[in-house]
Amino acid sequence: MNIQRLILRDFRNLHACDLELTEGVHILCGENGQGKTNLLESIYILSNLSSFRSAHLKDLILYGATYGRILGRIRSGGVQKELMVFIREGGKIVKVNGHAVGRGVDYFGEFAALLFSPDSLKWVQGGPEFRRRFMDTAISRIDRNYLLQLKEYKRVLYQRNRLLRLIHESKAPRETLKAWNEQLVQTGSRILEKRLDYLRDLAPVLREVFKAFFQKAAEIRIQYHSSWFRIPKLNGAMADLSVWTGRFRQGIEQKEDEEVRQRTGLIGPHLDDLDFLVDGRPLKPGSSRGEMRMFAISLTLSEAKLYRNKKGRFPVLLLDDVTSELDRKRQEILCKQIESLGQVFLTTTDDSFVGKMKSCARIFQVQKGEIILVT
């Protein structure tokens, strides 16, 4: 999977950008604030229909312009297609090969782009919501049905929480909770099953990438923490779906009185978490920043490799400020890793790193919104 051509109009400070792109590594160099990350952001939006930097669409439009546009010509699995995201203050229009797409869920999966940015450290040092988002986004890229299941689970959870409040206020009979309990159990158990399957497949890939970066073998383990029962180690055959369903149902029955008192659901995959363990030690905020950064980079590269194992092609890889805080040895290892990962876009302000990559990458200089091919 790769972008063959990227055309931007009035996207942030990129007024008029038209790039012919190839397979391999593309390095965007230049001073901070010139537009390097803006280019990565445009590719990310073309994949995810949302920004990793701003929740407000108007922030994406060049100051003084009335709209912004991102157009990408994509080749995936031998098929070419044209994707377009038209951004205006009141919303966005999305098209595939000239045809409008009404729902984001129908678009998701047309083009996959994975991102590492400084915020990716939150997968390790942030709260549980960041690790859940990492899992759910990664699985949804591979399995669009999982995204639909997440949407259904959130709908059921919202309706059930609303009913819990009514029951607490004696405005609804408790018997009405049973149907919503069962819907939550069925959708929640399927989400848990797919999360565990994904993490089980991710762990050995992560182990190999981690070994390459740290030049030593380590026991890398991912421990999933369910909010309603203990999950065994993620290796070998996992329990049948009926086991998760039965335990979820039992947990809801045990927690029902407390949930009514607190007027909210207290168990389910929306409250789950996971730990990343290195030689049995969890990576936590107390770990060194360098260790956490390397682990977050390893997670991103591992996700890309697992995507290829599942889909038969690499996603586009976006690496924002990835060389920051890496010593020379780690930078060299990173170079070797990304050379074989399909199409990669990398931003850096490190001239020495750019010099090392000249022989195996296309170099673009970014200055005041202008993007110029150097080599």
Image (tube, helix red, strand yellow):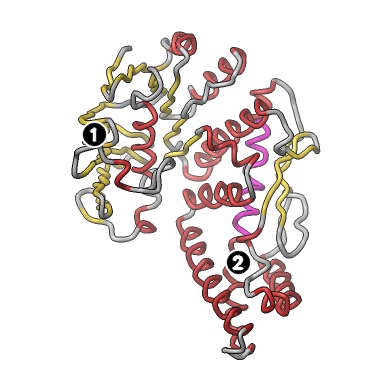
Q: Amino acid at mark 2?
A: Gly
In the image, taking residue 155 as reference, residue 32 lies left or right, namely left
Front-most of 124 and 263? 263
Assign the N terminus to one quadrant of the image: top left
Observer-nearest of 103 and 56: 56
Name the residue: 25% across, 55% down.
Answer: 90
Say which of 291 and 309 sits in front. Answer: 291
Q: Residue 190 location, x and y as percent?
A: 59, 64
Q: Position of residue 189 (x, y in %)?
A: 63, 66
Residue shown at 52% from the left, 76% from the top: 159
Taken as a whole, is the magenta stretch helix, strand or loop?
A: helix
Q: Secondary structure at mark 1?
A: strand
Above or below, comparing residue 156 to residue 270 in the picture = below
Image quadrant assignment for residue 313: top left
Instruction: Choose top left, top right, bottom left or bottom right for residue 11.
Output: top left
Q: Amino acid at mark 1?
A: Ile
Residue 188 occupies which quadrant of the picture? bottom right
C-alpha gap between disc 1 and disc 2 = 41 Å
The residues colored magenta run 192-208
Q: Earlier in the sequence, mark 1 or mark 2?
A: 1
Q: Do the numbered discs 1 and 2 sit on residues whose CB atoms are within 8 Å?
A: no
Q: Secondary structure at mark 2?
A: helix
Residue at mark 1: 7
- Up the image or down, 202 lies above or below 216; here it is below
Residue holding disc 2? 188
Which circle marks residue 284 in the picture?
Answer: none
- Reply above or below: 156 against 141: below
Residue 202: say if magenta: yes
**Residue at screen point 61% across, 47% down:** 131
| In front of the other: 154 or 189 | 154
